[in-house]
Image: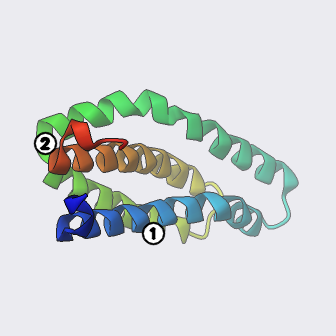
Amino acid sequence: HRHLLSWRFALTTLFAAVHVVHAHSYMGTAELRIVELALGDADLVDTLVTAFSSTLPCVFVIAPLVGMLMDRFGLFASVCALQAMALALCGLFFVPSAWAQVATFIVFTVYRSTLFALIVALHVALYGWRSWAR
């Protein structure tokens, strides 16, 4: 329980909370953005919403690759890569093209997989496996 009062715990919790809110905010607004950019083209909206919905389960395909890259480059590089993906996600979200959002879906899928893998990896690195899910 001493971990709950540490600065490391506070910072990693804040880091995780900010990114999880960011990820869920994007998931909650992606369809609204597609509708806005499609300019009334219902077929385009359906196609892009289906594409977005289809990319979300791909996290399970990407997760092993994310794990290999985290093992190879370490936690610091993984945190930096996550930050870069968060910035790319924000930038792509504001590109005023409905079709450009496909790139946003792909970045989001990799971002989300990396985020959850990194949350677990940071916890284990800081506190060990025995403290996980206690």
88 and 115: which one is in front? 115
Point out residue 37 in the picture as x, y percentages from the top left corner. Answer: 71, 66
The image quarter containing residue 25 is bottom right
One can see residue 92 in this view: no
Identify the image quadrant of the N terminus. Answer: bottom left
Above or below, 71 relative to 12 = above
Q: Secondary structure at mark 1?
A: helix
What type is the residue that disc 2 sits on? Phe
Name which residue lies at 41% across and 68% down: 18
Above or below, 107 relative to 3 = above
One can see residue 104 in this view: yes
Q: How many marks?
A: 2
86 and 132: which one is in front? 132
Point out residue 47 in the picture as x, y percentages from the top left corner. Answer: 75, 44
Q: Which residue is mark 1?
A: 91
41 and 34: which one is in front? 34
Say few, some or many: other residues with alpha carbon within 10 Å of mark 2 (under 14 / 14 to 19 / 20 or more): few
Q: Secondary structure at mark 2?
A: helix
Q: Nearer the viewer, mark 1 or mark 2?
A: 2
Identify the image quadrant of the C terminus. Answer: top left
Point out residue 32 in the picture as x, y percentages from the top left corner. Answer: 73, 65
What type is the residue that disc 1 sits on? Gly
Q: Which mark is residue 73?
A: 2
Which comes sooner in the sequence, label 1 or label 2?
A: 2
